[in-house]
Amino acid sequence: MPQSWDLNWPRALGGAAIQADFRTEPEDFVVDELAAPEAGEGEHVYLHIRKRGANTGYVAQQLAQIAGVQSNDVGFFGLKDRHAVTTQWFSVWLAQKPEPDWKTLDNEEFQVLSYFRGARKLRRGEHLGNRFQIRLRNITGDTAAAEQVLHQIPNGVPNYFGEQRFGHSGGNLDLVEKAVADQQAGQRRRMPRNQKAFALSAARSWLFNQVLAARIGRDNWLASIDGEPEANPSGPLWGRGRNAATGEQLVLEDGAMAPWKPWQDWLEHGGLSQERRPLVLVPQGFAWEWQEQEGRKDLLLSFALPPGTFATALLREVAELANQAAAAIK
């Protein structure tokens, strides 16, 4: 039976002093990719697309269908949330196929803003990052205390992996538990490739968050400690090889991950190598504005983050969020 996963990681900036509705409308979560691919000549077409209420995979399928190519011939910089308004870049490898009329794809869910030729497929994480504009609605609670938190955010927030990494109700973690149990029992059941990718990513993210939570508990997450393998505070993304941490940091990391030793063993057999991830997420261009609208109080936030990081890691330091999009799915 799937277990209940506690994804309520420790906060670092004093605790969320306000409550807010999150993602009431797609326009409450606006994401724009930073930078564009380089134009040139080649067999790939780069398409700049704005979407609303559609996920990245669905858009990629539509592009593949109209172009008459395989799904793996479509590339993009990163997955974007469905319940949002986002602009992002896609690439389609046409080879010698004729170029379709991309504008015939325009509908209520997405529109092609522009397109041009380029030399190679776009791959995940190659862009500079994303800029966010987020509206939190129906604010209640201690706004003065929230102001104190907001002033601290430009110095950095915990770089947690967001709840979406772990799947709905922690479903990706359930996949890990099953795979680990099979490994311990000596059973070699082959997991579908996409499920295995989700499970490997979720397991690494879970272990990293355990270490980061332990550092927050000791109030040393913002500064390097003895045994830090990098210039700035970091935590492990588990895989094959030796942990680069030593001394005090190695002891702390081993202790934080000790309950999950079977997960570490499973990851070491999963083909991934040891990596490190910063503990501190520093947003760029962070700004906020309180707004009174239609008898309610809103908080409008804007900031930019690098690839592979989560806006929710920042938002959870500010407010307890009632995710209206998730509530609508249940």
Image (cartoon, rainbow, N blue to C red):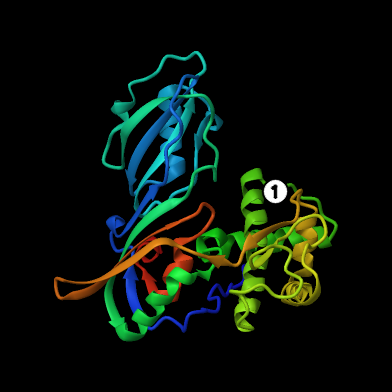
Residue with the mark numbered 1: 191
Against 120, is 147 above or below?
Answer: below
Between 99 and 221, the residue placed more toward the observer is 221
Residue occupying the point 67% across, 50% down = 196
Mark 1 secondary-structure assignment: loop
Against 119, is 124 above or below?
Answer: below
Query: Which x, y percent locates residue 176?
Result: 68, 60
Residue occupying the point 52% across, 58% down = 309
Query: Which x, y percent locates residue 328?
Result: 35, 63
Against 226, is 73 above or below?
Answer: above
Q: Residue furthest left?
A: 294
Between 216 and 75, the residue placed more toward the observer is 216
Query: Which x, y percent locates residue 20?
Result: 33, 74
Query: Which x, y percent locates residue 314?
Result: 45, 68
Residue occupying the point 74% across, 74% down = 249
Q: Residue furthest front?
A: 231
Residue 267 position by quadrant: bottom right
* Residue 248 as seen in the image, left or right of residue 161: right
Q: What residue type is disc 1 on?
A: Met
* Residue 255 as seen in the image, left or right of residue 195: right
Residue occupying the point 66% across, 72% down = 224
